[in-house]
Structures are given as C-alpha cells and as structure tokens.
Amino acid sequence: MRILTKALFLFLITTVAFPQKTLTLDDAINIALQKNSTLQKSMNTLKTYKSGLLASYGSLLPSLSASGSWSWNRNEDEGTTYNYAGFVYTSPASKTESRSYRANVDANWTLFDGLANIAGVSKSKNDLEAAKFSLERLKQDIVFQTISFYYDVINTSELLKVKVDDVRQAQKNLETITERNKLGAVTLADVYAQQVTLGNAELEEIRTRNTLETAKTNLLYYLGLDVFDNYSFSDNFSVDQLEVIKNRLSEESDSLSVLVSSAMDNRFDYKSALLNLEGAYDDITIARSGHFPRLTNSLGFSSNANSFDKLFASKSYTVGLTLSIPIFSGFSVSNRVEIATVNAKNQEVVVSDLEREIKRNLQKTFLDLQAAEKSLSVSEKNVESAEENLKIEQEKYSLGSSKLLDVLTARTNYTNARVAYINAEYAYVVLSEQLKYYTGVLDYKKYERTGDN
C-alpha cells in the first residue's frame, strides 16, 4: 500500500506541476510532418534535383558570352642625340597617346555529343521524380511510425485502467475477507493470501504506469517535443472504430494478390526504385557517348576601334564547326561504361529485392491481420466467459462452498482475458494501418495542414 501511495502521490505532483495538454492522433502526425529533420533535409535536397534538371536542359542550348575592353596608352620621349657619320643629330621631344575599344560576342553550341546531353535530360527528370516519390514515401513512414507510437500509448493506457481496477477490486476483497475473518467465517490464511494478491496487483500497476510513461516519452521524443511536457491523449479503441476498420478491410482486401498488385501500383519507394533504374540506364548512354565523335558550332562577332564613336565602324564575324573524333583515350571511356553498366545491374537487383520484400511484408501482415481479427473475436468471448466465471466463484466463496484460491484464479483469468482483449484491439488496429502502409495507400495528405509544410 505504501508503494502505491507514493506512486499516486508522485503522479499527482507531476500533474499539478505540468498542466496537461491534449494531443490527438491528427495533431501528433501533423507535428511529426512538420518537425521531422530527415523530411526537412529531403525537402531541401529536392531543390538541387530541380536545379539539376534545369541545367540539363541548358546543355541542349548554345552558350553565349559577351566581353568588352578599353585600354589607354601614353608615351613621352624627351628627345635623343646620336652621331651618324660624323654628324650629330638630335630628335625632338614627343608625346603620344592612344586608346583602344573592343567588343566581342561569342556563342558555342554542341550539335552532337553522342546523345550524352539527351540522356542527361532524361536522367535529371528521372532523378527529380524519384526524389519526389522518395519524399512521399518518407511522409508515409513518418505517419505510420507516429501511429504506432501513439497507439502504443493508447494501448498501455487501456492496460493501466485494467491494472487500476484490479488493485481497487483486490483492496475491496481484502477488506471483505478481513471482516469475515473477524467473524470467523474465513481463515487467517485467506487474509494473508489476499494481501499477497493486493501487493502483486499494486506492483503490476506500477510497472504498467512506468511502461506508459516510457511509451509517452518515445512518442514525444519522436515528435520533437519536450518529454517532460504533460499530455493527455484523447483517442482510444472504440467498438465502432474497429467495426469500421473491419468493414473497410473486407471491402478493400479481397485477396493477397490484389494487395500485391495494388502495392506495385501505389508504393512510392517502388516507383522511385524504377526511376532510379531508368537513370542508371541513362548513365550507360552518357558513358558510351565518349566513343562517338563530338560536333560543336561556334559563332563570333568582334569590333575594335581607337575611339568609342567608331567602335562598330569596323566589324569582324566568325563561324566555325569543330569535329572531334576520339581515337584512343587510354580505356577511360570503356571503364566508365563498365562502371555505369555494373551500377545499372546493381539497381536491377535493388528493384528485384524490393519486389520480394513487398510481397513478403504483405503476406506476413495479411496473415497476421487475419489472425488478429480471429484473436479479437476470441478475446472478446474470453472476457465475457471469464467475467461470468469470476461472478460464480465469488458467489460460491461468499456462500462458503468454494476456496479463496478458486476466486483468485478466476480473478487472474479475468484480468488476463481483459489484457489479451486490449492487446488484440491494439494489434488489429496497428496491423490494419500497417497493411495500408505496405500497400502504399496510407494517406498522409489528410494530416497536413495548409501552410504548415
């Protein structure tokens, strides 16, 4: 009793010191989508892919540059005396100035580079779309992880209610047995046995309360919130909610093959992997371009004058074509082709592994969900049966036709049945969300608030 009293006192002190804030599941997911550092970095990185696509389009266009120059020169000669054939000559002093103005415009255009620039545009497009899909999948990851953490809190909260009720009932039974012992209706051993039962119930409550605090801490830490803040959680597992989930699953999940087909169509990470594979093929084309000739075109215009007003009086135009034919490059091109080919093959393996992983996860989750549905149904009946059995044993004990051990066993069975039912609820709800996550249809957009992301 003293242990329970201390625990309750600490709980009350914590509640007074840190006023509670309500945190719904929607709030938690929205916070996670705003504060997740990996998501923020991915959104920033997406800008580099957009810039890369723009640069790849630029490689198809001519480059243009312009320059201008001005120079000034002044020479001062004070005169020179020299002797030539016995005659002395003196040149007069002189001062000269000159100015020069020049303007140039040059353009260069790659007409053919072995299709490297075309493949570069294709690769940049694939990279950008793959990055977008990866970002979408990351958001689904965050939503599912938040749901799992949140429902872990709810599940443990429901278990704590059972443990608190168990302690209250054990305390009530102890008071009843103690009074009956004073009247000589039961033995002192029954009192001791019930005291042990109460102590164990109090210990289980403390353990469950600690587990709940750990679950809350894990959730708040994942959301980037202060783990010392005191939150209440408004969502729980209702019968109506479970029925809605059951009906939705029966409509959407006709068979495992349907789920696999849906996953291949909807999984953002699978779409991203396919685009990365296409980009790897583009890398092969870019590498092979080194074996082909390169044709470039150049255009130029220049003007030069000694005074600014006559700058464009004299003009010069140039047009040129340059054909570069690679003959031998020390096997460097072949090396780049081989590296690109190996990378493409490795990416094919990545896609194949992902397909197998999707099928494995869907199969396991599909079977686990079917088992969870059956477990939920059985657990519900077990609770009803255990509750009825407990009432019978308590009545028989009150009439003196049963032992206390039978009552304690019935009480334990009832508590275990309630715990099993709550865990079955939790497993069923989480597995239903997990099935949507593995299928790729977990909707994160409904949790995003306008202007928050």
Image: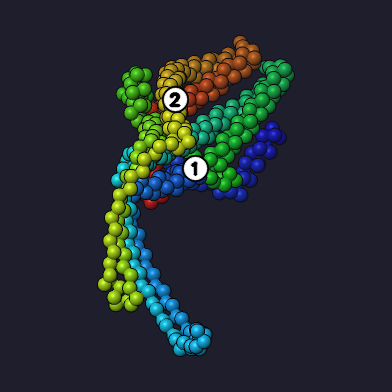
Q: Secondary structure at mark 2?
A: helix
Q: Quadrant of the N terminus?
A: top right
Which mark is first along the chain, 2 or 1? Answer: 1
Q: Residues within 10 Å of mark 2 (few under 14, many from 20)?
A: few
The image shows residue 10 at horizontal and vertical percentages of: 65, 42
> Which residue was labeled with disc 2?
349
Picture residue at 30% right of the left edge, 73% below the top: 311
Residue 130 versus residue 258 in the image, above or below: below
How far apart marks 1 and 2 lie (CA) works out to 26 Å
Q: Residue furthest front?
A: 85
Q: Amino acid at mark 1?
A: Thr
> Which residue was labeled with disc 1?
38
Report whether residue 410 is seen: yes
Picture residue at 45% right of the left edge, 46% below the top: 45
Residue 19 versus residue 387 in the image, above or below: below
Instruction: Give the quadrant of residue 156.
Output: top right
Q: How many marks on residues?
A: 2
Query: Camera-side residue: 374 or 117?
Result: 117
In the rendered structure, the answer to whether residue 347 lies left or right of residue 81 reads left
Query: Camera-side residue: 431 or 298?
Result: 298
Q: Are marks 1 and 2 in contact (CB under 8 Å)?
A: no
The image shows residue 232 at horizontal and vertical percentages of: 51, 42
The image shows residue 336 at horizontal and vertical percentages of: 45, 35
In the rendered structure, the answer to whether residue 231 lies left or right of residue 122 reads right
Q: Amino acid at mark 2?
A: Val
Query: Camera-side residue: 13 or 130?
Result: 130
The image shows residue 40 at horizontal and vertical percentages of: 47, 46
Picture residue at 29% right of the left edge, 64% below the top: 316
